[in-house]
């Protein structure tokens, strides 16, 4: 997986960023969870977003994915200022997010999950009666799974009967099916076996090859270094550094994560 | 997943869906052998008619339980809907059709109030609907001054004791209700979203499901069905009794749980709840025919509930393994 890093120097950082975050602020009561953070994501790159617990990673991405409304700052997506008030608006714009532990409905089938929130309906009596078009959704699920070599024995199977890796694959397949222009993944390798972790990382590589940028949130640094082009470190709501993955190492990143290093401090 | 795993899942699934039905058949077999009258068509029709209101309310309870919620107010709402519809006819000379629609409207409105308290007031469903249980019963007593209302006429009582040709009207009503609810849950987006919310509210919200809307409408439907049950009951008794349907919510919950509807949401079906309600009905009917006194009957019903749910839980454990 290492050669990918060398290649990545060429892509990324070219042209206009697909996502531009400027001076973003999110408060919860007296606590400033995200404090004037700037961040860019360019087409075809993987950005690792790392930090200790309560660093503000999840809050930051939830502002981008429409779960939270920021208290200050701006978000630009494909050059346009966006203000998402609901998760569906972000999804409609092309931002797909895979949340840790909350990605899929465990009691629903594979295809129901892929289409959840965007079900396809058959119309009767001029649209007066609309029922779910399960055959169509089933066939489409099969297509996207085949395209990405994801093998699930039976699509009518409930998600909770699948392994952790299979679930992650279904979540990724869902984002791909809806033509994600930006993919946000929150701890996608958590609670997975070694083989499954590698499969997920390979899927991320595949996404980059297809030109879909990824924001990868993780505190497993080897995973981040395996796929990320750039690494952004948050500490207590502030962005403390941003580095090319090829120009740093996990030791340095850890120093930033625990607050021993801080680029803002050096500059000030 | 290996072949044996799959096979075990299928077996457990079958057990889970099949147990109540199996218990129902065993009970019916037992009562057919021990009594002369059980299998007579008149008795079987009786069971179907007498449990109409329980089945209708159990359908509504299934909807709210699938959400991961509950509706404890159904018995009181049924009583109020029945009383208001009867009162409008008897005291205000309102046409029967309008009065019955008003009764349904009362149920829908109170259900939406439940939904509003849960969605916007953020009250736990147990608390909101428990409060409504008290409020609706109190309103029924106030409206009727504690006295029964009777004399609604045949156009009203038809829905409790009348027949379409040879087919009892209240049975036709519950069959239609069950069919519609089954279609709603298995064939529509709304039904799928009920399951999604029951499986995980936050997950559903993040995927773009309008959680508030689905919850509000579902509690509205539960209230509407409670109102309908109240009309059926009032029509069958030929009078609106202020203390009618006390404890109906517990019968409905028992029916749903017997039918495999999970109290934690996301798992179960309307058909299961109907079989559960019929099981309770058959048990009561059979014990009456066997001249079991009414006090020990309640003990036996409790024991059957515990047994059925225990079997259900073990079959789920088997499936997980």
Image (cartoon, coloured by chain):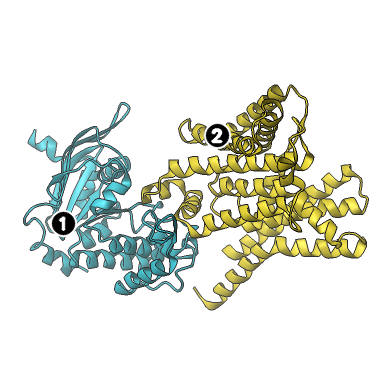
Chain colours: A cyan, B yellow
Q: Position of residue B140 (x, y in %)?
A: 69, 27
Judged from the image, the secondary structure of the residue bearing numbered disc 1 is: helix
Q: Chain of mark 2?
A: B
Q: Between B244 and B120, which is closer to the camera in this rendering?
A: B244
**Left or right side of B251 for A151:** left
Q: Which residue is mark 2?
A: B109
Task: Look at the image and tell me whether residue B94 can be seen.
Answer: yes
Instruction: Give the residue pinned by disc 1.
Output: A245
Q: Quadrant of the C terminus of chain B?
A: bottom right
Residue A223 x/y as whole percent: 27, 60
Q: Residues within 10 Å of mark 1 (few under 14, many from 20)?
A: many
Specify the subunit that label 1 lies on: A
Left or right of B55? Residue B114 is: left
Does A3 sit above or below residue B134?
below
Choose between A187 and B253: the one closer to the eye. B253
Q: Residue A135 at what x, y percent from top left? A: 43, 69
- Residue B98 placement, left or right of A265: right
Observer-nearest of A223 and B186:
B186
């Amino acid at each position: 997986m290492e050669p990918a890093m060398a290649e990545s120097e060429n892509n990324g950082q070219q042209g206009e960023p697909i996502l531009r975050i400027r001076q973003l602020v999110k408060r919860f009561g007296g606590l400033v969870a995200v404090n004037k953070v700037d961040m860019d994501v360019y087409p075809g790159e993987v950005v690792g977003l790392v930090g200790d617990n309560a660093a503000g990673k999840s809050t930051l991405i939830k502002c981008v994915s429409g779960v939270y409304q920021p208290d200050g700052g701006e978000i630009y997506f494909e050059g346009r200022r966006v203000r998402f008030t609901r998760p569906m608006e972000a999804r409609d714009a092309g931002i797909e997010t895979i949340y840790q532990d909350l990605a899929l409905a465990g009691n629903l089938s594979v295809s129901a999950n892929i289409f959840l929130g965007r079900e396809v309906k058959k119309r009767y009596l001029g649209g007066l009666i609309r029922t779910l078009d399960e055959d169509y959704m089933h066939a489409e699920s099969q297509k996207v799974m085949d395209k990405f070599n994801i093998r699930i024995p039976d699509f009518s199977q409930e998600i909770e009967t699948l392994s952790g890796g299979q679930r992650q694959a279904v979540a990724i397949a869902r984002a791909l099916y809806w033509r994600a222009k930006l993919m946000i993944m929150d701890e996608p390798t958590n609670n997975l076996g070694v083989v499954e972790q590698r499969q997920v990382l390979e899927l991320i590589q595949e996404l980059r090859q297809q030109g879909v940028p990824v924001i990868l949130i993780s505190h497993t640094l080897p995973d981040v270094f395996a796929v990320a082009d750039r690494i952004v470190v948050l500490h207590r709501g502030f962005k403390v550094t941003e580095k090319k993955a090829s120009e740093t190492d996990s030791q340095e990143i850890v120093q930033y994560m625990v607050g021993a290093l801080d680029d803002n401090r050096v500059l000030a | 997943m290996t072949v044996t795993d799959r096979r075990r899942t299928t077996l457990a699934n079958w057990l889970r869906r099949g147990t109540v039905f199996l218990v129902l058949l065993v009970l019916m077999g037992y009562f057919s052998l021990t009594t002369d009258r059980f299998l007579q068509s008149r008795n079987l029709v009786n069971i179907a008619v007498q449990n109409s209101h329980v089945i209708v309310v159990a359908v509504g309870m299934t909807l709210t339980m699938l959400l991961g919620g509950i509706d404890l107010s159904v018995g009181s709402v049924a009583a109020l809907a029945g009383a208001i519809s009867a009162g409008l006819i008897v005291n205000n000379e309102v046409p029967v059709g309008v009065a019955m629609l008003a009764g349904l409207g009362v149920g829908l409105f109170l259900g939406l109030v439940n939904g509003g308290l849960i969605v916007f007031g953020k009250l736990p469903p147990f608390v909101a609907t428990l409060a409504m249980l008290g409020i609706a019963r109190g309103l029924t007593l106030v409206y009727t001054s504690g006295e029964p209302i009777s004399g609604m006429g045949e156009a009203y009582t038809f829905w409790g004791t009348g027949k379409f040709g040879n087919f009892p009207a209240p049975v036709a009503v519950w069959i239609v209700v069950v069919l519609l609810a089954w279609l709603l849950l298995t064939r529509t987006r709304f039904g799928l979203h009920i399951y999604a919310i029951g499986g995980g509210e936050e997950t559903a919200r993040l995927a773009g499901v309008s959680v508030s809307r689905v919850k509000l409408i579902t509690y509205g439907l539960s209230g509407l069905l409670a109102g309908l049950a109240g009309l059926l009951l009032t029509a069958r008794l030929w009078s609106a009794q202020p203390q009618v349907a006390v404890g109906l919510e517990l019968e409905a919950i028992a029916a749903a749980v017997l039918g495999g509807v999970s109290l934690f949401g996301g798992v179960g079906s309307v058909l299961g709840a109907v079989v559960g309600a019929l099981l309770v009905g058959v048990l009561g009917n059979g014990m009456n025919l066997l001249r079991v006194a009414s006090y020990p009957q309640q003990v036996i019903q409790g024991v059957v509930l515990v047994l059925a749910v225990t079997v259900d839980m073990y079959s789920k454990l088997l499936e997980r393994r």
